Amino acid sequence: MNSESDTRTGVLVEYDRTDKMFSNPTDERTENYVTGRFG
């Protein structure tokens, strides 16, 4: 989930197999989140 707007709770930016999400995410926001570069 990514909460970039204060008008909604969050948005699902990517959905895939767990191993792909953590090794080769498609969306840069997912990569930033799983590597701790967010907020």
Image (cartoon, rainbow, N blue to C red):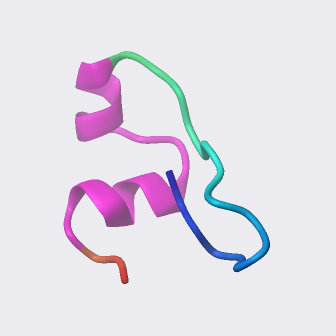
* Residue 23 part of the magenta segment: yes
Residue 17 image offset from top left, x and y in percent: 37, 16
At 28% from the left and 22% from the top, the residue drawn is 18
Q: Is residue 15 above or below residue 1?
A: above
Estimate the x, y position of residue 26 in percent, counting from the top left: 52, 42
Question: What residue is rendered at 33% in x and 61% in y?
Answer: 33
**Which of the 4 image quarters holds residue 4?**
bottom right
Nearer to me, 14 or 28 = 14
Give the dominant element type of the magenta stretch: helix, strand or loop.
Answer: helix
- Point out the stretch of residues depicted in magenta: 18-36
Relative to 37, say whether 24 is above or below: above
What residue do we see at 33% from left, 26% from top? 20
Answer with left or right where residue 7 lies relative to residue 14: right
Residue 5 x/y as whole percent: 71, 76
The reply to whether the magenta stretch includes residue 33 is: yes
Is 39 or 19 nearer to us in this picture?
39
What residue is rendered at 23% in x and 22% in y? 19
